[in-house]
Image (cartoon, rainbow, N blue to C red):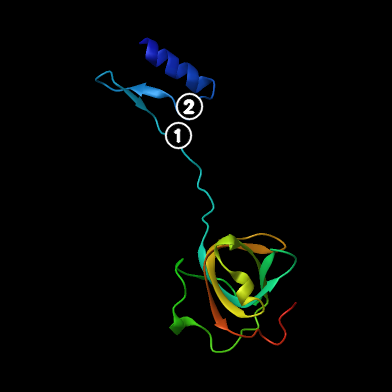
Amino acid sequence: MTLSSILALSLALMGGLKSAPTLSAQGSAHTASAQVPATNKVEVVSVTGCLREQGAGNWVLVAATDPVPSLANQAPVAELPKAAPAGKNTFRLLGVGEFNLAQHRDRTMVIRGLLIKATPVSRINMTSSVEALATCAAGAPK
């Protein structure tokens, strides 16, 4: 066993490496891959609802549709709703600094982004937004 093999093994035992090196038949060092547990996949979704500001800089989409799998790109005009949906979901919006949401306050928006499921309110890390209608559904919460 070489000095470098001993050092690498010592580091692995002390937690400094994720896996311990092994020697191949030719004597060269290889790292054995550790099994990495599967992580929860974050989906890119599209939701449509009424954009509201609840406190300074705290943007939410209310009366929103159920999330549907989507691309991160902005929704094309052909996919915009003709009437404001009366959905039952609320989503807190993240990553809002890149979007001028104040100009769309109290309007129906199509928001796309990464869905972060949580209780009591799920969040969407925004990747795109587009105004669909200049109004919201009549019963949309303030």
Residue drawn at (44%, 15%), measured in percent from left and top? 7
Image-quadrant location for residue 92: bottom right
- Residue 65 visible? The answer is no
Mark 1 crowd level (few <14, some 14–19, many ≥20, 10 Å Cα): few
Closer to the camera in the image, 130 or 49: 130
Q: Quadrant of the N terminus?
A: top left
Q: Is residue 79 left or right of residue 83?
A: left
Image-quadrant location for residue 66: bottom right
Find residue 21 and report its horizontal and vertical position in percent: 39, 23
Q: Earlier in the sequence, mark 1 or mark 2?
A: 2
Residue 63 higher or lower than 96, as above or below: below
Mark 2 crowd level (few <14, some 14–19, many ≥20, 10 Å Cα): some
Residue drawn at (35%, 10%), measured in percent from left and top? 2
Residue drawn at (51%, 24%), measured in percent from left and top? 16
Q: Amino acid at mark 2?
A: Leu
Which residue is label 2 attached to?
Answer: 17
Residue 43 higher or lower than 62, as above or below: above
Which residue is label 1 attached to?
Answer: 34
Query: How far separated are the C-alphas under marks 1 and 2?
Result: 10 Å
Q: Is residue 77 left or right of residue 142?
A: left
Q: Amino acid at mark 1?
A: Ala
Element at label 1: loop
